[in-house]
Amino acid sequence: MPESTRAWGLGLIILLAAPGCLRASSEVEHAPAEKSVAVAQPAPAIATPEPPRVPPKWPAAGAPLTFGQARFPWGFAKQRVYLDAGHGAEGNTGNRSVTCEDEESFTLRVAEDLARRLEATGHFEVRISRKEGQRVAYADRLTSAAKWGAHVLVSLHSDSRGTPRLWSPREGLECNRQDTTPGFSVLWSEEAELPLQAQRAELARALARNLSRVGFPPYDGVDYTGLYAADLAEPGVFVAREPTHRRIFVLRKPAIPSVIIETHHALDFEEAARWREERTLEAFGAAVTQGLVEALAPSLLDTPPREAAVDSASAP
């Protein structure tokens, strides 16, 4: 076959096949897309609000203690405070705490700290009844306070309550423990003439009021039956009712207002631990300071500050 004839036939075949190729290609390229199926989306999660945080309750670690600077009214004269570090007399070391610390050691430590805080205000002079290693009779303490010219006597103690059990804070040591009755108490005696009775009561109530304000819980007195009666004017305050043979010397004998502060329950493990913390001592110092101001100068608290009084006097 001539070359021209063969070439013409091949071209015809290509032309005839081309439409089919194009059509097939078009069908592939433009095939209808499959219908999409909508998938339901899960509803957004709703955040559950966290329950309000309940602060720890005293004497748990971190229990809140709230306090500020004491408020001294204008005209408040410098006062002399005789701090009795309870016990420390011959043969009288006091109770032994849940960690077997003698009460006389605890009271001296707290008295020294409180004295520094009171004197730092510039409004108090403080004398402590004894020093480390001294054995001072109670009668000598009252004589010392009187000679010095103290305006008030505050005796510091820790309490021992209820029926304890033995436990061991460390190997080879056994101490008493009872964790159910924490809290402070303030004690005073009615054994005095009416004016002194009233001053003792006011001092005890002012101190207890301010101890409660900063966050220390008052003791309910469940173990005080037959020894002290609740003073209904202020929670945590008790009036001495001891039998004659065991009446407390520093409550009934001083000729100046006097009280005992039972700072805490020494057999309560958590409460004893709190009383080794700086913030507890700071809160205690603030409460005692304000309590002393309210007891020693109640009328002055109603007096406006000096600047306000001057402004009022110069007003037309």
Image: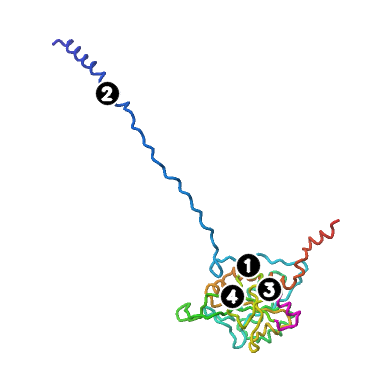
Q: Which residues are magenta?
A: 190-205
Which residue lies at the image location 60% right of the left edge and 77% below the top edge? 221
Q: Amino acid at mark 2?
A: Ala
Q: Amino acid at mark 4?
A: His
Helix, strand or loop status at disc 4: strand
Residue 138, image x, y percentages: 66, 86
In whole angstroms, how far apart are the C-alphas of marks 4 and 3? 21 Å
Q: Which mark is residue 132?
A: none
- What residue would you read off at disc 4? 264
Q: Quadrant of the C terminus?
A: bottom right
Q: Which mark is residue 233?
A: 3
In whole angstroms, how far apart are the C-alphas of marks 2 and 3? 105 Å
In whole angstroms, how far apart are the C-alphas of marks 3 and 1? 19 Å
Q: Which mark is residue 214?
A: 1
- What residue would you read off at disc 2? 24
Q: Amino acid at mark 3?
A: Ala
Helix, strand or loop status at disc 2: helix
Residue 91, image x, y percentages: 59, 88
Horizontal arrangement in the rendering, residue 4 relative to residue 23 (left or right): left
Compared with 91, 150 (above or below) is above
Whether residues under marks 1 and 4 lie with C-beta atoms below 8 angstroms apart, the answer is: no
Q: Please check the rendered image and state whether residue 236 is part of the magenta-colored stretch, yes or no.
A: no
Tell which tag, 3 or 1, sits nearer the viewer.
3
Q: Earlier in the sequence, mark 1 or mark 2?
A: 2
Q: Earlier in the sequence, mark 2 or mark 3?
A: 2
Whether residues under marks 3 and 1 lie with C-beta atoms below 8 angstroms apart, the answer is: no
Total numbered circles: 4
Residue 249, image x, y percentages: 67, 85
